[in-house]
Amino acid sequence: MKRSSAVLLVAGGVVVGVAVAMVVVPGFGPRSVVNRVIEAFGGVTCDDEQCPPDAGWMWPVEAPVTSAFRSAERPEHHGVDMAADRGSPVLAASAGVVITAECEASLQGEPYGCDRDGSTEVRGCGWYVKVLHAHHTATLYCHLQQEPEVSVGDTVVTGELLGYVGSTGNSSEPHLHFEVQTGSTFDPPRSATAVDPVQFLAERRTP
């Protein structure tokens, strides 16, 4: 069955393509009803049990930041690059639900695949994972070494293994590209609305 990429507003929910954030609007029906409608359209839901509002936060890898968020040199760099060694574990920065786990890589408009290292000429995140959290927030983890250890719809806790550092996609050497994306009731989290992960985690007292 083909899944529409259009935005669908249903009983207090928002469905956007296959991987979406569910938002409950007060007075628009029980959450369980909203969940069933969203799931019927191929969406992924995230309630307070799966995405606890008070969940802790942590850095996904133990490594220095080598490329900052939207610097003067890279104004469209919507996250940070962390110079972790190849094969280093990549952990969920907070509890949530996996909404994307796939390969994204192309070269000159043709599929490139993620079974080999990428380069600066290759487009895309390579193997990557996106996790939806509470408060309309999502995190993105790019350039993983191999197929992620999680699948769409999986619930993860803070610190759970998502995959391993690699160099797939638009990457010249092993590292993790990490984004913190924000959204709102009718605007799902995306790179264009990302915030600086360093500041975001500092505000949550993450070492």
Image: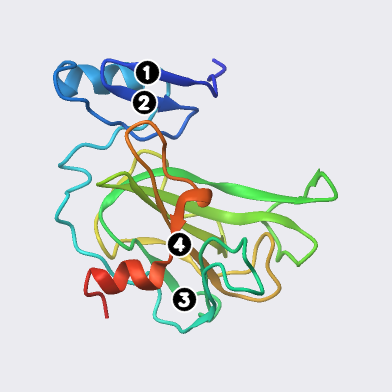
Task: From the top left corner, tell me how far across and down residue 109 is, in percent.
Answer: 82, 44
Task: Look at mark 4 in the image and give the residue it sits on.
Answer: 163
Q: Which residue is mark 2?
A: 14
Q: Mark 1 or mark 3, which has the lower sequence index?
A: 1
Please state if 101 lies on the left or on the right of 202 as rendered: right
Can you give x and y, in whole percent of width and height, for residue 115 in the image?
Answer: 68, 57
Residue at 39% over, 27% down: 43
Task: Give the residue pinned by disc 3.
Answer: 88
Mark pair 3, 2: CA separation = 35 Å
Q: Nearer the viewer, mark 1 or mark 3?
A: 1
Residues under numbered marks 1 and 4 in contact, where contact means CB atoms less than 8 Å apart: no
Counting other residues with Cα less than 10 Å from the Cα at mark 4, is it few (<14), some (14-19), or many (20 or more)? many
Q: Amino acid at mark 2?
A: Val
Q: Earlier in the sequence, mark 1 or mark 4?
A: 1
Density class for disc 1 (Cα within 10 Å; few <14, some 14-19, many ≥20) is few
Q: Nearer the viewer, residue 69 or 45?
A: 69
Callout 2: SS = strand
Residue furthest out toward the right: 108
- Per the image, the residue denoted by label 1 is 9
Above or below 183: residue 10? above
Disc 2 and disc 4 in contact, CB within 8 angstroms: no
Say which element carries label 4: strand
Mark 2, mark 4: which one is toward the viewer? Answer: 2
Q: Position of residue 33 (x, y in %)?
A: 20, 16
Quarter of the picture containing the N terminus is: top right
Q: Earlier in the sequence, mark 1 or mark 2?
A: 1
